[in-house]
C-alpha cells in the first residue's frame, strides 16, 4: 500500500515536471516580448521580411498559462524571440476574421467546441494548445511545437527553426 501511495504522489512530478523560476536560472529581466496581433505581425513582416512566431493559445488552456508564466518570461527566451521573430499571439477562440495567404479565416462554432479556422489551419488540422508555429519570410510554416516546453527545450527549438530558415534561404529546394 505504501508503494502505491508513493507512486500516486510522485506521478504528477513525472507527468508535469516543473522548472525552477526563471529568476533562479537567469538574471531577472525587465525586457518583455512585444506580442503583436495577427494583422500587425503580418503587416510588419511584409514591410521588412522576417520570421514570424505564432503563439496559438486559448484562455482556458492551463499549459498555455504555464508557458506564459515560466518559459516566456525567461530572459534568454525573450531576447531570442525579440531578436529573431515577429511574435504574434493568436487566440484559438478569437472571432475576428483574419487573412493568411490571400484567404480569409474565421471562427467556426461547430468545430471542436468553437475554434478559429486559422489556428486550425496553422496546426495542420490537429490543434492542441499551446502551439507555436514558425513561418518563414514567405509565410510558409517551417516548424511547429505543441504543449508546454521548459526554457531550455523551447529555446533550442527556436534556434533550430532559425537555422532551418537560414538553410532554406541559402539552399532553396531543400
Image (cartoon, rainbow, N blue to C red):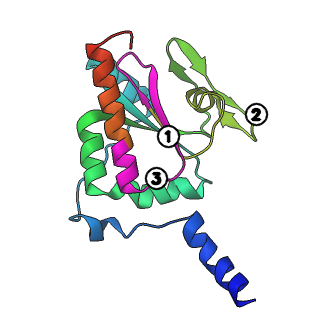
Are discs 3 and 2 less than 8 Å apart at CB?
A: no
First in sequence: mark 3 vs mark 2 = 2
Q: Is residue 171 magenta?
A: no
Task: Locate residue 96 relative to residue 54 in the image: left or right.
Answer: right
Q: Quadrant of residue 60?
A: bottom right
Are discs 1 and 2 less than 8 Å apart at CB?
A: no
Q: What residue sits right under mark 2 in the picture?
A: 111
Q: CA distance from mark 1 to mark 2?
A: 22 Å
Q: Quadrant of residue 170?
A: top left
First in sequence: mark 1 vs mark 2 = 2
SS under mark 3 = loop
The residue segment tinted magenta is: 134-156
The residue nearer to you, when weighing 3 against 90, is 3
Location of residue 105 in the rendering, given as x and y in whole percent from the top left corner: 60, 22
Mark 3 Cα-neighbour bin, 10 Å: few <14, some 14–19, many ≥20: many
Q: What residue sits right under mark 1 in the picture?
A: 145
Mark 1 Cα-neighbour bin, 10 Å: few <14, some 14–19, many ≥20: some
Amino acid at each position: 500500500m505504501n508503494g502505491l501511495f508513493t507512486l500516486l504522489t510522485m506521478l504528477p512530478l513525472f507527468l508535469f515536471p516543473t522548472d525552477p523560476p526563471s529568476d533562479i536560472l537567469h538574471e531577472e529581466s525587465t525586457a518583455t516580448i512585444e506580442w503583436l496581433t495577427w494583422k500587425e505581425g503580418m503587416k510588419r513582416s511584409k514591410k521588412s521580411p522576417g520570421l514570424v512566431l505564432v503563439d496559438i493559445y486559448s484562455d482556458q488552456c492551463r499549459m498555455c498559462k504555464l508557458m506564459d508564466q515560466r518559459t516566456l518570461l525567461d530572459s534568454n527566451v525573450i531576447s531570442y524571440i525579440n531578436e529573431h521573430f515577429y511574435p504574434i499571439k493568436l487566440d484559438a477562440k478569437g472571432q475576428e476574421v483574419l487573412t493568411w495567404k490571400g484567404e480569409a479565416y474565421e471562427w467556426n462554432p461547430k468545430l471542436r467546441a468553437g475554434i478559429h479556422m486559422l489556428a486550425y489551419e496553422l496546426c495542420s488540422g490537429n490543434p492542441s494548445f499551446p502551439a507555436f508555429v514558425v513561418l518563414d519570410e514567405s509565410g510558409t510554416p517551417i516548424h511547429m511545437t505543441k504543449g508546454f516546453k521548459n526554457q531550455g527545450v523551447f529555446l533550442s527549438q527556436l534556434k533550430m527553426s532559425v537555422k532551418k530558415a537560414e538553410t532554406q534561404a541559402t539552399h532553396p529546394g531543400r
